[in-house]
Image (cartoon, grey):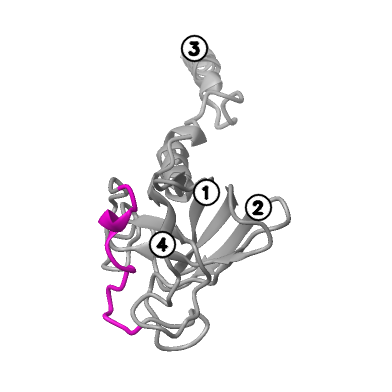
Amino acid sequence: MNKYVGLVAIAALIGACGQKEHTAPTSDAPPPAGDGPSVATTTEPETRATAEATAGAAVKLSPTQGNTANGALKITAAGTGVKISGMVQGLKPDSEFGFHFHEKGDCSAPDATSAGAHFNPTSQDHGNPQAQPHHAGDMLNVKSDAQGVAEVDIDNPEVSLQSGQPNDVLGKALVVHAKPDDYTTQPSGNSGDRIACGVIAVQTN
């Protein structure tokens, strides 16, 4: 009987060892690098959406009939407003020029009157953009250098970009005028003819 019990005990011991050898590979060790879920798969759409949101918009300014002013500007969201940056050339040297967002995205008329009046979604009087009241589209004059080139770097906190709100300037026009805005005369600051015009469009590159 003792011999029989001994054999049973040995068999049980062998079976237990076999079980350990079989289950050993299923340890909790971390998988090799690259085998786990890719972080990129969860962040890529977010990253792409962020890139699109920060891409901004572009404006190609073309001269109106009989004028030479032209340029390329970029508009980007900046806080609750926008930043306009870039260059306008073909201007009268050492001069100032009215610079406004206009209500219609249409520069087709030879004198750009098709762009309508200043962008004014809150129905304010025209005025200095650094005081109240003023149109949302009112901005400081741009100034040319001795070569007739104006470097533009303007913030406008009164408008938005791709927001879908009434103050969204996407699809509106940006206009350069022949004379400086006096910030007083209604409704356009006595800034004269429109010498360049461009429609604000989503930047594609």
Residue 115: in magenta span: yes
Specify the amino acid type for callout 2: Gly
- Which label belongs to residue 69? 1
**Crowding near the residue tagged with mark 2, few <14, some 14–19, many ≥20 C-alpha atoms within 10 Å:** some
**Crowding near the residue tagged with mark 1, few <14, some 14–19, many ≥20 C-alpha atoms within 10 Å:** many
Give whichever of discs 3 and 4 has the lower sequence position: 3
Give whichever of discs 3 and 2 has the lower sequence position: 3
Q: From which residue to which does the magenta span run?
A: 110-125
- Which label belongs to residue 99? none
The secondary structure type at the circle numbered 4 is loop
Quarter of the image holding residue 154? bottom right
- As measured in the structure, the alpha-carbon distance from the residue carrying label 4 to the one carrying label 1 is 12 Å
- Residue pushed farthest front? 66
Q: Which residue has dot 4 on it? A: 193
- Image spot of residue 71 (x, y percent): 53, 45
- Image spot of residue 36 (x, y percent): 51, 29
Specify the amino acid type for callout 1: Ala
- As measured in the structure, the alpha-carbon distance from the residue carrying label 2 to the one carrying label 4 is 17 Å
Q: In this rendering, which labeled residue sits more in front, label 3 or label 4?
A: 4
Specify the amino acid type for callout 4: Asp
Q: Residue at x 28, y 50 (%)?
A: 106
- As measured in the structure, the alpha-carbon distance from the residue carrying label 3 to the one carrying label 4 is 104 Å
